[in-house]
Image (tube, rainbow, N blue to C red):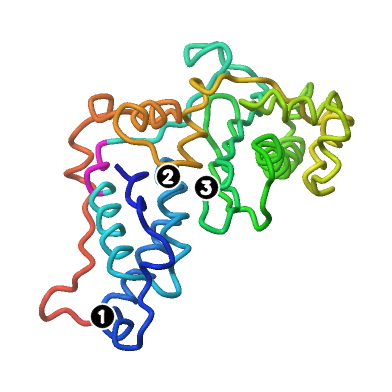
Amino acid sequence: MAARAHVGMTKKDCPASLEARAQCDVWRGRYATFICAAMWLANYAPEISFAVSYLARFLSNPGPKMWGAAKKLAGYLKGRIGIFYYMRRGGRAAGLSAAITKVPTLTAAADASHNDNADGTTTVGYVLWVGACLVLARVIKLKHVTLSTNEGELSAQTECGRDVVAFRNVLRELGLQQAGPTVMMCDSHGAIAVAHRRAPSSRTKHIHLRDMWVRQLVDRGDATLEYRPTGDHADVGSLTKPLVGKAFAQARKMMLLSEPDESPGKSLKKKVQFNLTPRLGESDT
């Protein structure tokens, strides 16, 4: 699975000596090229976002372990050719068969994996939907250490809120003004209490002022936080931790990606073929 490609890798696996680095120079350029391409592909295959984000952390000095993980990710992408990403109409709350609405609703969900990095920082991820369409999936490694899971979740909601405001502005310019606050789903009751100013200040006085920005969104009516159980949070949870087997398949399905047996016609694979190797005798002009 794509999310498992990075398991067991740390900075200690990077080559330290000049001799070891020289051996890695053979494929170092190809590693960087692949990671850059995978970052672009993550826009159309959001389930690989976590693996790509993790592999990109070793871009300056990758080791054989990272190169092997990159090849595993490439193998997953090759086998993923039968899975398509659909843009559907209707609302998520009413289901995929809901009636078409003139103004699609913007919704979001964010999650955090507390202190999951070697330096003690937290990985956060969030997704945004417009109607029933997934329009954004992002993974961010925080630069500061969070002291509790609630603080990590609050940081995730703050990062998510920045894109929520941006998308609300875009939708307003397109004539799709949102009627009410954007629902931002969270699996932490503590973070929701802090955002809605229901938590004691003695437990939150150390939190960075920047992470309290989500309170402003709630106060001015741009967003509201709602609880979603962790079991139903697999889609955004796949952006903060490696998932395998059924959990990974469930997360991919929740991101509204079709499975191979749902793909619209097998003939498409045969027709769409690109040959980037020039034929013998052909000029470059």
Q: Residue at x 36, y 28 (%)?
A: 247
Query: As shown in the figure, which amino acid type bears the numbered disc 2?
Result: Tyr
Give the x, y percent position of residue 71: 25, 58
Q: Secondary structure at mark 1?
A: helix
Foreground residue among 279 and 229: 229
* The magenta segment: 78-82
Q: Position of residue 99 (x, y in %)?
A: 55, 11
Secondary structure at badge 3 equals loop
Question: What's under tag 3, amino acid-wise?
Answer: Asp
Which residue is located at x 81 percent, y 31 percent? 222
**Which mark identifies residue 26?**
1
Above or below, 112 against 73 in this view is above
Q: Main secondary structure of the magenta part?
A: loop
Look at discs 1 and 3 and give the one toward the viewer: 3
Query: Label 2 near label 1: C-beta < 8 Å?
Result: no
Q: Residue at x 30, y 35 (%)?
A: 83
Task: Residue 231: say if magenta.
Answer: no
Vertical side of 213 occupied by 20: above or below: below
Give the mark, 1 or 3, whose residue is nearer the N terminus: 1
